[in-house]
Amino acid sequence: MGTLNWIIVLGYLTYVVVDGVRRAKGTKEIEGYFLANRSLPWWAVGLSVMATQLSAVTMIGTTGQGATDGIRFVQFYFGLPIAMVILGVTLVPFLHGAKVFTAYEYLERRFDAKTRSLTAFLFLILRSLSCGTIIAAPAVVFSAIFHWSLPVSVAIIGIPTVIYTMIGGVQAVTWADVKQMVIIVGALVAVVVVLFVKMPVHPGAALHIAGATGRLKAFDFHFTLKEDYTFWSGIIGGTFLMLSYFGTDQSQVQRYLTARSVDEARSSLLMSAYWKIPLQALVLLVGVLVFVFYQFKAPPLLYNPAQEAQVEAARGPQYHALQQRYAQAFAAREAAARTLADAEGPRAKSEAKAVFRDREADVDTIRSDALAMVTQVTGDASKDVNYIMPRFVIDQLPVGLSGIFIAAVMAAAMSSIAAELNSLSTTSVIDLYRRWIRPEASDKHFLTVGKIATAFWGLLACFVATYAARLGSLIEVVNLFGSFFYGSILGVFLLAMIKRARPVGAFFGLIAGMAAVAGVAYFEPEVTFLWYNVIGALVVVGVGMALSLLPPRTSASPQPSAR
């Protein structure tokens, strides 16, 4: 990768780790270790909330999503501003004012211990799966760059992060997030500039080419339960997902519980409401521009170099023949793209667009044949969307900038993983261990258990990561995992705000919600995952209120003894 790039990567990561450890003061008690003594400023908390989402998954998976599918994924976030406003007047004052360590601690005060424990247990399953996916993203980069096996790449990023999290606590994690945001946004803007400079057509023509393939279509008003990203799935399903993620997921709740007051906690969430959609659009635009760049610069037939080497070794003649077809199809598509860029007048543009789409379809067909060959050779389904951005960074970015981008991916991964592991540790200690096993132990004991829990969840996440990278677009995998749980968990918190809801309704409503989502996923697989959040929440509230309104069971009165 070059000496200068290595110096940038290692220098930045060393700075992040050293500064994180330096800030790990006041963590001798669980209040300091898990909540930074509730002393952080709103802007740092807000940047931490955003940075937890702008992980390596975003840098790799979302850019790949933009390159293959365009910017319509941005509709996924349309419910975010609505959710932030609702949370600002509902759950944020409840949870911050209650002085709890976790969101689930509040559920015991409102309902009972078993509802709290079941909800916390579901969170632990959800977040450990998602954390594994976040580790998988930088592991993909390492695998693509250095031709290492995926498990080795996972260990390289996962194990140091576990150690760093065990030392730092939430305060170190938050300030690392602040630095992460700076380098991520800077790297993304720099990549956009490089792409526009290196493309042989002016920016307007580049966007016109992207628009010809539908990659600039940001709105789809067609209402359907079977399409992943539409305006309605974003507004309705996305709102439910964001309400649950920011309002009930401990990895996010723990951020604003560290704020100094309720007002500062609200302000930290509103920062995401204002800036998340523009930032997400920027990430997707990078992917779209990479797609346009590859209209004029031949991309590899397979973006994953390890799989390409396997196919060449096993089926060299067939693969080389496919490469020749690909070269011819690319040349025809490049000519069509240049014609489209130069076309003037509605008729000429329409004709050029039709030809370009046909040539693009020819290239896609050949790439599909190559991916099918990978599956035949390796036995694994090949979805190399996660390798598009890493391959572009290594092959096309100038020396220095590629190091900055890799440093941004690494820093994003480390801080996001650290935040996830810290929330898993907090929930394990506060909601399960302290509640059921050692309620009267000292803070020193709980800190030791918390560090052990961090190590356990980190190792489990590393195991999950070895499989997550093979499941397709990483950003979709994260949200798919979440949607199985989020709606039902949100439903419990909605019940908590209804005065007539009783513990029996909350507990069995949660079980019913999870069962309903599982049933829909199994029997109606065409229903897109965003609607799982709506289904889970509504079933929990419906079943929960139905059970709550039933007359409580009363014990029979003792009969007088016979004389």
Image (cartoon, rainbow, N blue to C red):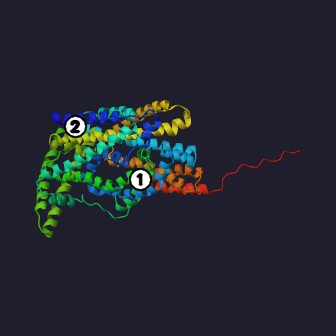
Residue at 38%, 32% (x, y): give it. 167
Residue at label 1?
A: 266
Q: Is residue 226 left or right of residue 519?
A: left
> Where is residue 504 shown, x and y percent of the image?
59, 50
Residue 400 is drawn in which quadrant? top left
Residue at 58%, 55% (x, y): give it. 501
In the image, residue 43 sits, relative to residue 29, either above or below, namely below
Quadrant of image for the N terminus? top left
In space, the residues marked 2 and 1 are separated at their CA atoms by 41 Å
Residue 136 visible in the snapshot: no
Query: Residue flagged by tag 1: what amino acid is it?
Result: Arg
Quadrant of image for the C terminus? top right
Q: Is residue 326 left or right of residue 27?
A: left
Residue 418 is drawn in which quadrant? top left
Residue at 15%, 60% (x, y): give it. 205
> Where is residue 8 shown, x and y percent of the image?
21, 36
> In front: 406, or 396?
406
> Where is residue 89 shown, x and y percent of the image?
46, 57
Mark 2 against mark 1, which lies toward the viewer? 1
> In front: 145, or 434?
434
Say which mark, if any, is on residue 145. Answer: 2
Q: Is residue 555 left or right of residue 477?
A: right
Secondary structure at numbered mark 1: helix
Q: Which is more N-terminal, label 1 or label 2? A: 2
Secondary structure at numbered mark 2: helix
In the image, residue 285 sits, relative to residue 181, either above or below, namely below
Work out which residue is located at the far right of the displayed protein and give it: 563
Local packing at callout 1 (Cα closer than 10 Å; few below 14, some 14-19, many 20+) is many
Query: Residue flagged by tag 2: what amino acid is it?
Result: Ile
In the image, residue 55 sits, relative to residue 166, either above or below, namely below
Local packing at callout 2 (Cα closer than 10 Å; few below 14, some 14-19, many 20+) is some
> In front: 3, or 216?
3
